[in-house]
Amino acid sequence: MELELDSKAPTERTAPSAAWNTASRVLKYSVVRLVSLFVTVVIGIYLTIMIANMGGYVDKMMIAEIQERVTVQVAKNPANKTMDPATKARITEVQIQNEIKRLKLDQPLAVRTTRFLKNALTLNLGRAMFLTSDSGSRSIRAIILERIPYTLLLMGTSELILFFSTLYLALALSRSYGSFWDKLVIALSPTSAVPPWFFGIFLILIFAAALRLLPFGGVIDAPVPQDFSARALSVLKHLILPASALIISSFFLSIYNWRTFFLIYSSEDYVEMAKAKGLPSRDVESRYILRPTLPTIITSFALLLIGLWTGAIITETVFQWPGLGRTTYKAIGLYDTPVIVGTTIIYAYLLAITVFLLDFIYALVDPRVKIGSGESPQ
């Protein structure tokens, strides 16, 4: 009896010990991963601040703009017309210095960029320098919340259609390697080297200028229809051309990439074995081709979702689509650093969170993956 108890004791202690080891390993990995991702975000945002500020050149431009604006205001003030030039110059200089101090442009660049970085990391986005929302607010939060629905509508519609349609067609093409349609997709894949805004210009020339079937741009007809269904149809009509440009620009190359990816996995020995056993083609595709490629498909889909945030900068501008991409384009042109940094920090956080969660999703869909384990999958 004593021998049996001694033999069972290690077994009873093994399960809690294994669970504790797994939990501690996952916790340690999560902490290290989060810290490394946060450091990456900090470096990326600081570089964005420096680039958007052009190493301090934008600050010099702002100071020059303040000097010009204040000088004109003092000169146009009727109360200053009888003032002697020396007094007028002294008042002008005082107002210029007050404005520079108000904007904290008199502080060293390192101090201002560090404060800017701290505010960005805490999502204290502040106010834009030049851009305003439709309501007239300069709050960056208000500007982003006002523009992001339009970007999600355009990018979400086009990217989701592109992802699922090309995935389905690529899987179908992988079954018919060397066929006419397969060769056609290969021949047309170089068309994806053309940016979407270029296709957009041609679509505008054909369907808006020549055929007059669709509008040139914008998001809704003017005056705005009163009925909800009429407004929805109007938005849909304006959505067709920019969404089509985004889809066409990546359609054939995306099919080609996924088709090549599926062909690599379909030539594996276990796939040939499954076919030799007489399994239906659908079972072979779902269990032996799609399942091993699921981590890659999930990664592509996750990065697509957070990519919706950035918008299509030039395409939205060409179609006058009032989304976040067009707002970013305006901010770049006006050197509106707070708006550029505000959109970038949110995208950086979304990217870091997605990368972190993907590691756990891989462990759920692929039993070969172990969180925090340095061993290669068996």
Image (cartoon, rainbow, N blue to C red):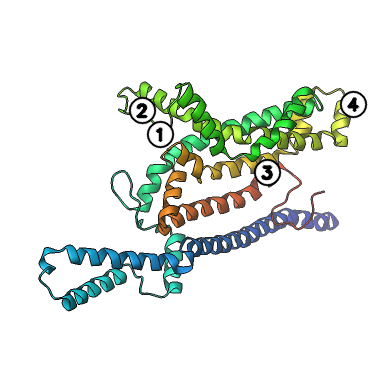
Residue at the spot x=35%, y=74% of the render? 106
Residue at the spot x=86%, y=22% of the render? 278
**52 w.r.t. 224: above or below:** below
Report the amino acid beneath label 1: Gly
Q: Which residue is mark 4?
A: 276
Q: To which quarter of the image does residue 4 belong?
A: bottom right
Q: Which mark is residue 218?
A: 1
Q: Nearer the viewer, mark 3 or mark 4?
A: 4
Q: In the depicted view, which residue is nearer to us: 310 or 326? A: 326
Q: Which mark is residue 364?
A: 3
Mark 2 secondary-structure assignment = loop
Residue 57, position as x, y percentages in the image: 44, 67
Mark 4 secondary-structure assignment = helix
Spatial CA span between label 3 and label 1: 43 Å
Of callouts 2 and 4, the N-terminal one: 2
Residue at the spot x=83%, y=24% of the render? 279
Q: Nearer the viewer, mark 3 or mark 1?
A: 1
Q: Which residue is mark 2?
A: 221
Mark 1 secondary-structure assignment = loop
Classify mark 1: residues with Cα within 10 Å, few (<14), some (14-19) or many (20+).
some
Q: Nearer the viewer, mark 2 or mark 4?
A: 2
Spatial CA span between label 3 and label 4: 29 Å
Q: Are marks 3 and 1 in contact (CB under 8 Å)?
A: no
**154 w.r.t. 105: above or below:** above
Of callouts 3 and 1, the N-terminal one: 1
Residue 201, position as x, y percentages in the image: 52, 34
Residue 64, position as x, y percentages in the image: 34, 67
**343 w.r.t. 211: above or below:** below
Residue 141, position as x, y percentages in the image: 38, 51
Q: Are marks 2 and 1 in contact (CB under 8 Å)?
A: yes
Of callouts 1 and 4, the N-terminal one: 1
Of callouts 3 and 4, the N-terminal one: 4
